[in-house]
Amino acid sequence: MTDTTASPAQRRALYELDDELTELRALARDIAQREFRDLALDWERNGEFPWRNIALLAETGLLGVALPERYGGGGGSWLHAAVVLEELGASCYTTAMAALGELGVQTQAILHYGSEEMRERYLPGVAAGRVICAICMTEPDSGSDLSAMTTTVREDGDSLVLNGRKTLISRADVAQVFVVFTRFADDAGRRSIGAVLVDRDTPGLQVAERFSTLGGEGLYGVVFDECRVPAGNLLVREDGFRKMLHAFNGQRCLNAAISVGIARGANDAALEHARSRVAGGQLLGSHQGIRWILADNAIQIEAARLLVHRAAAQASDGFPRRYESAVAKTFANEMALKVTDNTLQLFGGHGWIDEVPAERYLRWARYGPLGGGTPHIQRNGIARHLLGEL
C-alpha cells in the first residue's frame, strides 16, 4: 500500500513550490486557462458532465497525479492534488468538481483501505478517465451528523445487502462505482459506520432525482433497495467510523484548494478589470480604495493557500489530519466568499451580468462552506482539538 504523505522536499513546498510542483502547476494552469475557462459557462448551462475535460486531464497525467504509478498514476501526494485542483477551480468550477473524486477521497479510500483486487479493478480506470467515483454520505435527514445515518448493510451469505437513500450526491449520473457510507445492521452502536463499494449496474441501485445548483453542477439522489453486492465489496468495517472520518479529511483539504483557486481566479479578473477600466478620468487601479481591495484579496488568498498546502503536506496514515484540514477549509471557504464578493463589487453594475466573470466566481465560492462539513462543524472539531478532547 502506497503512502501519499509528502516527502521532505514537498514539505518545504509549503512556502515555495519545488521544481516538480512548479511544473505541475504550470501544466495545470495552461490546460485550465486554455481549454476550460472560456467554456465554463457552457458546462453550467447545458448541465452535462465535462467528459472532454476529464479526458484531457487523464491524457496529461493530471487526473491520476496522486495515484501510484503501478495503477497508472503519477505517484504524487495530496499536495500534488491540491495544486491541480486550485488551478481547475480558478478556471472552471464544473471541471474542478468533476475531478475532485478522482483526485481525492474516493480513490484514496480504495487505495488505502481496499483490497488489492479492488485497487486493480478500479484505480487504473480512474487514472485513465474511464472510471468516475461517487461518494455517498449525505442523507435526507443526515448531513454532518453521521450518527443520524439510516442507510444499513446486512450480511446475507456471501453477499452484502444495502438499504437506504442518499441525497445531494455529486457525479451520481456518470459514476461507475459508489463509495457508500453505511451503518451495519447487526451493530446498534452510534459509531457502527463503514463503507461498501457498489458498482453502477448493481440491481437495487437507482439514481433518482436531479437537483440543479447555483454553481451549475448537478447533484442527485441515490436509492439502495435490497441492493446486493459481493461480500468482497466491503471497503472498511473494523474501526470504520474513525477510518472513514480520517479519509474524509482529504475531502476537506481539497475542497479548500478549490476555494483558493476560485478566489484567485476572481482576483485575477479583478486585476485585469482594474488595469483596463477608466473611472473618474483614471484607470480604476489607480484609486487607492481599489488598490486596497486588491491587496487585501491577495493577502487572504496567500494565507489560505499556505494553510491548504500545510494540511496536504502533513498528511499521515494516508490522509490529511483533522485539525489542519479543518483550519484550512474554514479559512479558505470564508476567504473565497469575501474575495469573490469584493470582486463583484469592484466590477460595479457590470459584475451583475452573467457574461462577466465576477458573478460566476461568487456563485462558485458559495459551495465550499456547504460541502465536506460546514464551517460550524469545522470549528467544533478545531475547538475539541484545542481542548484536548479528541
Image: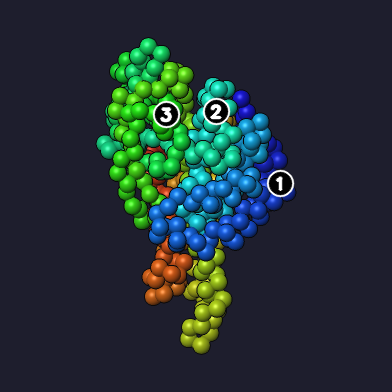
Label 1, secondary structure: give it.
helix
Residue at position x 52%, y 74% in the image: 273
Work out whether residue 186 or residue 290 is closer to the camera in this orientation and state it: 186
How far across and down, in percent of the image, does residue 333 sit?
A: 44, 51
Q: Amino acid at mark 3?
A: Val
The answer to whether marks 3 and 1 mark residues whose Cβ atoms lie closer than 8 Å is no
Of circles 3 and 1, which is in front? Answer: 3
Q: Which residue is mark 2?
A: 121
How far across and down, in percent of the image, does residue 106 sit?
A: 49, 35
How far across and down, in percent of the image, does residue 206 sit?
A: 33, 35
Q: Amino acid at mark 2?
A: Arg
Q: Upstream in the sequence, badge 2 or badge 1?
A: 1
Quarter of the figure that contains the C terminus: top left
> Is residue 306 in view?
no
Q: Which residue is mark 1?
A: 20
Residue at position x 41%, y 75% in the image: 350
Q: Which residue is mark 3?
A: 198
Residue at position x 59%, y 39% in the image: 127
Q: Residue furthest right?
A: 19
Q: Upstream in the sequence, badge 3 or badge 1?
A: 1
- Give the alpha-carbon distance from disc 2 to disc 3, as whole Å: 13 Å
> Is residue 73 in view?
yes
How far across and down, in percent of the image, does residue 58 sit?
A: 60, 45
Residue at position x 55%, y 70% in the image: 271
Tell me the crowding category of disc 3: few under 14, some 14 to 19, or many 20 or more residues within 10 angstroms, Cα based: many
Label 2, secondary structure: give it.
helix
Q: Upstream in the sequence, badge 2 or badge 3?
A: 2
